[in-house]
C-alpha cells in the first residue's frame, strides 16, 4: 500500500485552512444566536492554533475576537468578553505587520508585538475593522448597565466590584471604537483600594506606558432653555465664531494633569506588593520626568531599603536632602545608616546634629546621639574589660577604662537631657538619665530621676 507523504508547507497550509474554517464557522454561529456551536467551533480553532492567532488574516482575527467576546458576554463573563472585543479596536488602530514564518503567512498586530515575535522582513499594512457597527449594537446596553453598577459600587465603597466594572466600561467603549482612558483611570483608582491590588498595578503601568495624563478639555454652551450642552471642539469653535443665536455662555473646562499621581500610586502599590525592582524602575522613570517630585524620591528610597540595597538607599536619601535641605527625616535616616559603620561615626553625628538643627525637639535624633556618644553597643565589653583588669590586680589600667567610660557618659549627658526635654514621659530617657547621673556622680540629679522613673512605672501598672 502506498503511503501519502505531505510536505511541511502543505501541512502548514492545511492547518491554516482548518483554523480559518473553524473561526468562520464560529462567527456564523454567533451571528445566528447559536452560542453553544460558536463556543465549540472556537475551542476547535484554538486547539489548532495553539495560541498562534497571528497565522490568521486580520479579518479572520476580527471574527475571532468578535465571536470570543460575545460568547463570554453571553456566559455572563462581561469583563473578559469586553476585553476580547476591545482587541478589534487595536486591529484598526495598530499597524499590521505581515510576513512569513517559514512557509506560513503571519499577521502581527502592533509594532511592539512584531518586534517581540522574532519574525523578520515584516511589512506594514493597515486594516479597517468591519464589525464595529454590530459591536455597538451589542454593547450599548451593556455600557449603560456597567457604568451604573460601577458608579453605585464606588459610591458604596464596594471597590472589589467597582474596579472590574470600570474596566468593563473601558473595554466595552473601546470595543465600540470610543476608547476613553478616563474609565481605565477610574479602574486603577478603585482596584488600588480593592483586594486585587496586582490588577491595579497592571492598569497603572498601562496608563503610564501609554502616556495618559488625564488632561481633557470639554466644551459647553447654554441653549435657549438655559441648559448646558456639550459639543466637540470643532462645532463649539464654529458656533462661537459665528455667534450662533441658539446658544450663549460658551465655556470650556480642562481637567487636571494626574501623571505624577499615576507614578506615585503605581510605585506605592508595587512596594506594598514587594515588587521592588518594578517600583525602582517606575520611580526612576517618574523622577526623570518630574525631577522635583519629593514623593517619588522617597518611594524610590523606601524600595531600596525594603530590598536591602543599602548603598542605593543612602544615595537616595542624599538625593532627597539635596532637593530639600530641611528634610529632617532623611537627615535622620542618613545618621542611622552611618552609625551602623564604626568608621562613619563622625559622619553619623553630623547627620543627627543636622536633624536637630532643623527640629530642636526631634527626640529620635537626640536618642541616637546619646547612645552613639556613650558607645552603648560596646558598653558591656568595657565593663568586662574593667572587671578583668581589676581581678588581675591592674587597678591603674582598670581605672583608666572606667574614667574613659565616665567621660563618654558625661559627653552624652547633654544629648540625653535634650531627649528627655523633647519626651518627658519617655521612661527610657528617664531611666537612662538616672544611670548617667549616677555614673557621673551627680547624686542629686540621680535621685530626682529615680523618683521620676518610679512615678512613670506606677502610671503603667
Image (tube, rainbow, N blue to C red):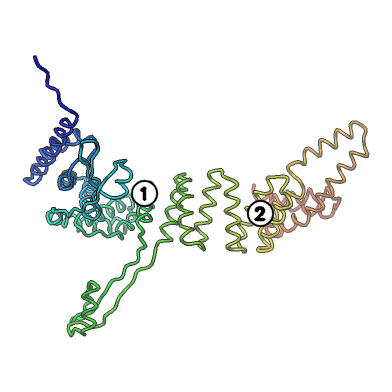
Residue for badge 1: 202
* Of residues 49 and 44, the one drawn nearer to the viewer in this rendering: 49
Asked which quadrant contains residue 273, the reply is top left
Residue at the extreme left: 32
* Of residues 365 and 256, the one drawn nearer to the viewer in this rendering: 256
Left or right: residue 192 compared with residue 460 = left
Q: Position of residue 122 (x, y in %)?
A: 26, 46
Local crowd size for mark 2, using a 10 Å CA cut-off: few (<14), some (14–19), many (≥20): some
Q: Which mark is residue 22?
A: none
Judge depth for marks 1 and 2 and give the one in front: 1
Q: Position of residue 87 (x, y in %)?
A: 23, 50
Left or right: residue 360 compared with residue 2 = right
Residue 49 vertical placement versus 456 (above, below)? above
Q: Residue at x 72, y 54 (%)?
A: 349
Q: Position of residue 289 (x, y in %)?
A: 46, 60
Residue 35 vertical placement versus 264 (above, below)? above
Q: Secondary structure at mark 2?
A: helix
Q: Residue at x 67, y 61 (%)?
A: 361
Left or right: residue 206 compared with residue 270 = left
Left or right: residue 382 compared with residue 11 = right
Tag 1–tag 2 contact (CB < 8 Å): no
Residue for badge 2: 364
Local crowd size for mark 1, using a 10 Å CA cut-off: few (<14), some (14–19), many (≥20): some
Q: Residue at x 8, y 14 (%)?
A: 1
Q: Position of residue 427 (x, y in %)?
A: 69, 50
Amino acid at each position: 500500500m502506498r503511503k501519502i507523504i505531505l510536505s511541511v508547507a502543505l501541512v502548514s497550509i492545511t492547518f491554516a485552512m482548518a483554523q480559518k474554517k473553524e473561526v468562520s464557522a464560529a462567527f456564523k454561529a454567533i451571528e445566528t444566536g447559536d452560542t453553544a456551536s460558536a463556543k465549540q467551533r472556537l475551542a476547535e480553532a484554538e486547539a489548532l492554533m495553539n495560541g498562534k492567532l497571528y497565522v490568521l488574516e486580520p479579518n479572520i482575527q476580527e471574527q475571532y475576537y468578535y465571536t470570543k467576546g460575545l460568547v463570554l458576554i453571553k456566559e455572563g463573563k462581561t469583563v473578559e468578553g469586553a476585553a476580547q472585543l476591545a482587541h478589534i479596536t487595536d486591529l484598526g488602530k495598530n499597524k499590521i505587520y505581515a510576513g512569513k514564518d517559514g512557509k506560513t503567512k503571519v499577521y502581527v498586530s502592533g509594532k511592539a508585538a512584531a518586534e517581540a515575535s522574532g519574525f523578520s522582513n515584516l511589512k506594514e499594512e493597515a486594516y479597517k475593522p468591519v464589525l464595529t457597527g454590530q459591536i455597538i449594537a451589542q454593547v450599548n446596553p451593556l455600557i449603560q448597565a456597567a457604568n451604573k453598577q460601577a458608579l453605585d459600587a464606588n459610591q458604596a465603597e464596594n471597590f472589589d466590584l467597582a474596579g472590574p466594572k470600570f474596566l468593563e466600561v473601558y473595554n466595552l467603549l473601546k470595543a465600540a471604537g470610543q476608547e476613553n482612558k478616563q474609565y481605565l483611570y477610574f479602574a486603577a483608582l478603585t482596584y488600588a483600594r480593592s483586594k486585587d491590588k496586582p490588577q491595579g498595578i497592571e492598569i497603572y503601568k498601562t496608563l503610564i506606558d501609554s502616556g495618559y495624563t488625564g488632561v481633557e478639555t470639554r466644551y459647553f454652551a447654554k441653549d435657549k432653555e438655559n441648559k448646558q450642552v456639550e459639543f466637540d471642539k470643532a462645532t463649539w469653535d464654529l458656533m462661537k465664531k459665528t455667534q450662533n443665536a441658539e446658544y450663549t455662555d460658551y465655556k470650556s473646562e480642562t481637567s487636571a494633569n494626574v501623571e505624577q499621581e499615576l507614578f506615585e500610586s503605581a510605585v506605592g502599590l508595587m512596594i506594598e506588593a514587594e515588587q521592588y525592582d518594578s517600583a525602582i524602575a517606575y520611580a526612576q522613570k517618574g523622577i526623570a520626568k518630574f525631577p522635583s517630585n519629593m514623593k517619588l524620591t522617597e518611594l524610590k528610597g523606601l524600595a531600596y531599603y525594603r530590598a536591602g540595597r543599602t548603598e542605593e538607599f543612602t544615595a537616595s536619601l542624599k538625593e532627597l536632602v539635596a532637593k530639600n535641605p530641611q528634610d529632617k527625616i532623611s537627615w535622620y535616616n542618613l545618621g542611622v545608616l552611618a552609625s551602623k559603620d564604626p568608621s562613619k561615626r563622625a559622619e553619623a553625628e553630623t547627620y543627627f546634629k543636622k536633624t536637630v538643627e532643623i527640629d530642636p525637639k526631634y527626640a529620635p535624633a537626640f536618642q541616637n546621639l546619646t547612645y552613639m556618644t556613650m558607645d552603648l553597643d560596646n558598653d558591656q565589653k568595657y565593663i568586662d574589660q574593667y572587671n578583668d583588669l581589676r581581678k588581675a590586680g591592674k587597678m591603674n589600667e582598670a581605672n583608666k577604662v572606667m574614667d574613659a567610660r565616665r567621660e563618654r557618659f558625661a559627653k552624652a549627658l547633654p544629648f540625653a537631657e535634650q531627649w528627655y526635654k523633647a519626651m518627658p514621659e519617655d521612661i527610657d530617657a528617664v531611666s537612662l538619665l538616672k544611670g548617667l547621673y549616677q555614673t557621673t556622680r551627680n547624686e542629686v540629679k540621680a535621685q530626682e530621676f529615680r523618683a521620676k522613673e518610679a512615678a512613670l512605672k506606677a502610671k503603667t501598672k
